[in-house]
Amino acid sequence: GEDVEQSLFLSVREGDSSVINCTYTDSSSTYLYWYKQEPGAGLQLLTYIFSNMDMKQDQRLTVLLNKKDKHLSLRIADTQTGDSAIYFCAETHTGTASKLTFGTGTRLQVTL
Amino acid sequence: SQTIHQWPATLVQPVGSPLSLECTVEGTSNPNLYWYRQAAGRGLQLLFYSVGIGQISSEVPQNLSASRPQDRQFILSSKKLLLSDSGFYLCAQNGQGNSPLHFGNGTRLTVT
């Protein structure tokens, strides 16, 4: 079955870059997503990448996909205190509905 | 743009009581709708999804049920709540195909 794994916690200093990693097992994944969850809130879509891409950049966010190793990463440049949140990666593949499989989330703590 | 409304935001219910959580979406027609549950400190588990009115798919056997009486309304119900039903319930929607999921702000349910 599908499995998505993330490390549980990451601490960075304000202004540094953050790199959040994710591995997945489903080789038929077609879309991979990064979501952000602030305390007590729902999930906010940050960015996503199609499986035939290896990189996508959107302002301070860079997504890297290594399909051979089934490894996805999210780099946040110039990390700010407002970036403190839980970050979830998720994958899906072509089907009737986008049934996402989520990782357990990485809690990013930004320190001054 | 799409908007997802979930209510109530928080709910405390005794064991054995019924449950009804409502989700409505605006700004889109014929969406795929989803109910996810997030247990404390854990990732998201897909409970139900619906690709149309009256069409419900259940992902895991459980004490809950879902209904879609209208195109943009998705309801999560239980006849008798269990302690293990406590969690953060998130409604999500996307269009057809593999467009990204967008989430509501969630309902935090505590069963006492």
Image: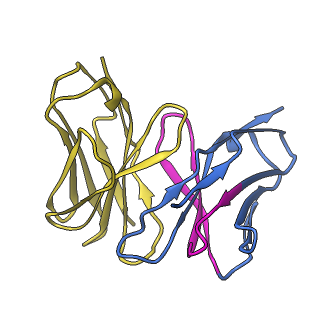
Please identify the quarter of the rendering in which residue B48 is found: bottom left
Residue B103 in percent (x, y) is at 42, 53
Q: Please tell me which residue lies in front, B54 or A71.
A: A71
Which quadrant does the C terminus of chain A fall into?
A: top right
* Vertical arrangement, residue B48 with respect to residue B21, above or below: below
Residue at x 69% of width, y 80% of height: A53
Q: Please tell me which residue lies in front, B93 or B15.
A: B15
* Vertical arrangement, residue A84 with respect to residue B101, above or below: above
Residue at x 75% of width, y 68% of height: A69
Could you tell me what secondary structure mostly forms the magenta stretch? Answer: strand
Tell me, by letter, which chain the rendering colours blue. Answer: A
Q: Please tell me which residue lies in front, B33 or B43.
A: B43
Q: Is residue A35 magenta?
A: yes
Residue at x 16% of width, y 29% of height: B80
Residue at x 22% of width, y 28% of height: B81
Magenta span: A22-51
Please identify the quarter of the rendering in which residue A54 is found: bottom right
Tell me, by letter, which chain the rendering colours yellow. Answer: B
* Vertical arrangement, residue A66 with respect to residue A36, above or below: below
Residue A18 in percent (x, y) is at 80, 49
B76 left or right, relative to A56? left
